[in-house]
Amino acid sequence: MRDLNKSEEFIPGIVTVIHTFGRDLKWNPHVHMMVTEGGTGKNTEWRHIRHISYLSLRKRWQKLLLDHLEELVGKKSEAKKLRNKLYRDKDKGFYVHAKTQIKSAKIAAKYIGRYVGRPAIAES
């Protein structure tokens, strides 16, 4: 969204929950995220975005993760090989499950509450 108008520096509303497990409690790191379809800017109270390209979202997510990986591990040859392989093998970007618009705050709270309030429970 910030790329839409760099001089305006739009900032969306975002709620993020990071999980390291799936329903079966096995290792499955993933992110749940709700993002507003618009944002505020320096000179604008709110700007609504009617369409967010699914392909652009996937590619942007891939770039952000791989750039961050490079920041963490540097430009070591193994990391560079992995980065190049992931760009080659995932040419449409990393997987993103982009649900349709949530129609009310109550539905949004219920959705994100399912994930925030569900910690893994030890079997012992």
Image: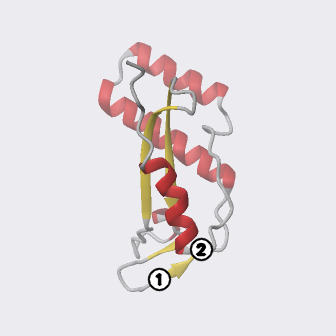
Query: How many residues crowd around disc 1 within 10 Å: few (fewer than 14), some, or many (20 or more)?
Result: some
Residue placed under numbered mark 1 in the picture: 46
Question: Mark 1 belongs to which amino acid?
Answer: Trp
* Percent of width and height locating residue 79: 42, 19
Q: Is residue 89 left or right of residue 20?
A: right
Residue at figure coordinates x 57%, y 33% from the top left: 23
* Percent of width and height locating residue 69: 39, 31
Q: Please tell me whether residue 20 is drawn above or below residue 123 in the rendered image.
A: below
Residue placed under numbered mark 2 in the picture: 49
Q: CA–CA distance between discs 2 and 1?
A: 10 Å
Tell me the quadrant of the picture where the C terminus can be found.
top left
Along the line of sight, the residue nearer the viewer: 22 or 73: 22
| Secondary structure under the numbered disc 2 in the rendered image | loop
Q: Is residue 37 visible?
A: no
Query: How many residues crowd around disc 2 within 10 Å: few (fewer than 14), some, or many (20 or more)?
Result: few
Question: Mark 2 belongs to which amino acid?
Answer: Ile
Using the rendered view, name the quadrant where residue 107 is placed: bottom right
Q: Please tell me whether residue 110 is drawn above or below residue 44 in the rendered image.
A: above
Along the line of sight, the residue nearer the viewer: 20 or 72: 20
* Percent of width and height locating residue 24: 57, 27
Residue at figure coordinates x 66%, y 25% from the top left: 89
Q: Do labels 2 and 1 touch, CB within 8 Å?
A: no
Using the rendered view, name the quadrant where residue 121 is placed: top left
Q: Is residue 89 left or right of residue 12?
A: right
Along the line of sight, the residue nearer the viewer: 84 or 124: 124
